[in-house]
Amino acid sequence: MTDTPAPPRSSPLHDRHETLGASFTDFGGWNMPVRYTSDLAEHRAVREAAGLFDISHMAEFWVHDGHAAEFLDYALAGRVSTMKIGKAKYSLVLAESGGIVDDVIVYRTGEQYYLVIANAGNRDAVAAAFARARETWPAAPASADGYPTVKDVTDHVALIALQGPRARGILESVPAVTILGTPLDELGYYAFTEGTFDGDSLFVARTGYTGEDGYELLVPVDRAADLWDAVLAAGAPAGLIPCGLAARDTLRLEAGMPLYGHELSLDVVPAQAGLGRVVAADKPAFVGEDGLAAAPADAPVLVGLVSEGKRAGRAGYAVLHGDDVVGEITSGALSPTLGHPVAMAYVSPAAAEPGTTLTIDVRGTRIPATVTALPFYRRNA
C-alpha cells in the first residue's frame, strides 16, 4: 500500500486569484497562480511599471532569544551576527556534505531576533536542518536558556511582492499603509522597515526575486486579501497588474537568480553555483564546513548561455563542446526583455570561460550558444 500524496495547499489569496481568472499550478506543494493573462504581458509590466505577486507559499521562521546570532552563524553558511538591525542578507542552509539544503533571506529585526524566509518546498528540510544544527552546535550554551527559539510561522503570515520601477510610488499611495520606521525614500536595498496596514502590523522589505526594485510585504494571514486589494487598486493607474509564477521565472532567469531544484540542490556546493562568496569560511565552525573542504575542484560550474534565434534551451537539455557533452541546462527561456534565448547551465570548468562557443542540443538540433557572465539583465540604478 502506498501513501496518497497530500493535495497542494491553497494560498490565503486563492479566491482573489480565481476571481482574476488565474491559471494554477502545483509549486512546492502549493496551488499557485501561474498566470492571469499572458506571460509576456506580466513580465513586461514588471520591467516597465509594476507587478504584484502572491508569494505566500514561502516559509517563514523566527529565530530569537538565547544566543540566536551565534546559533545562526553555525546553522547558516554566512555570518549573520555582524548584520545591523534593519538589514537583510542572502544566505544558504548547507548539509554536512556541503550541498545546499536551501537558499534563504535573513532579516535581523533585533539584537537576538531574526526572520528567515525559505523556499516553499524546503520548509520541512530547513526546519530539520535547524533541529540538527541545535544538536551538533559545538558552542552550545550550558543551559537551555541559551538556546534560541526557532518558530515556524508560515501558517500565520502571508507574503506579497510588489516589484517594478513604480513600486515605491504605488506603495506610498496605498491609503491604509503607514510606515512607522525608515521612510521608503530612505530605505536601502536589502533592508526593511516596520509599518501598519489599517492598524495591523506590516513588515516591508526592499527585496525581491525579479531583478527590479520593489518590496516584499509580510502581513497577518487574515489581512492578506485586504492588502492585495488595496495595493492593486492604488497601483492600477500606474500600470500595476497581478503576475504569476511564469513571469516570475523569466524575470529571475534574466536576472541570473538561481532557483532551488534547478540551479541549487543537495548535489551542488556553493562555489559551483557562483555563491562561494556567501560562505564565511573563516568562522570557527559551521554546518557543511568539512564537506566543502572535501569538495572536488573540477566539479561543473554554473554559467550563462546566450544564443540567437527563437529556440531556447530548456532544463535537462545537453550542452556540448564539439562532439563532447560538457554540461546540462538548468533553466532556459526566450528572454522577453532581451529578445533572444538565454539559459543557465552547469558545464565543466574547461568550457566555462566567458566567450566560449558551445552548442545546445534542442530536440536533436545543435543551437550555437556563447558562455556569458551572469546576470543577463541588470536594471538601471
Image: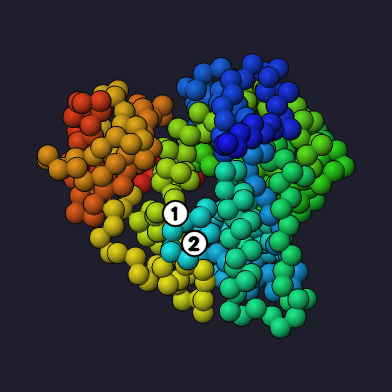
Q: Nearer the viewer, residue 276 or 199?
A: 276
Image position, residue 144 (x, y; %): 76, 76
Residue 99 horizontal side relative to residue 203, left or right: left
Disc 2 or 1, which lies upstream in sequence? 2
Q: Of the numbered discs in the image, which one, if any, rests on residue 16? A: none
The image's colour scheme reads rainbow
Q: Which residue is located at x 59 percent, y 55 percent?
A: 126
* Residue at 51%, 58% in the rendered image: 92
Q: Residue furthest front?
A: 1
Q: Secondary structure at mark 1?
A: loop
Q: Residue at x 78, y 76 (%)?
A: 145
Tag 2: amino acid: Ala
Structural distance between the alpha carbons of marks 2 and 1: 7 Å
Neighbor class of circle 1 (other Cα within 10 Å; few <14, some 14-19, many 20+) is some
236, above or below 245, in the image: above
Q: Mark 2 touching mark 1, by CB under 8 A?
A: yes
> Residue at the spot x=74%, y=32% of the render?
12
- The answer to whether 143 is drawn above or below residue 331 in the figure is below
Front residue (pair 14, 85): 14
Q: Is residue 362 left or right of residue 243?
A: left
The image shows residue 54 at horizontal and vertical percentages of: 65, 33
Residue that badge 1 annotates = 266
Q: Residue furthest left?
A: 322
List the single residue furthest toward the bottom.
142
Is residue 30 visible to the viewer in this orientation of the structure? Answer: no
Q: Residues within 10 Å of mark 2 (few under 14, many from 20)?
A: many
Q: What is the count of numbered marks?
A: 2
Q: Quadrant of residue 316?
A: top left
- The secondary element bearing badge 2 is classed as loop
According to the picture, the residue beneath numbered tag 2 turns out to be 95
Check disc 1 and give the amino acid type. Answer: Leu
In x, y percent, where is residue 51? 59, 30
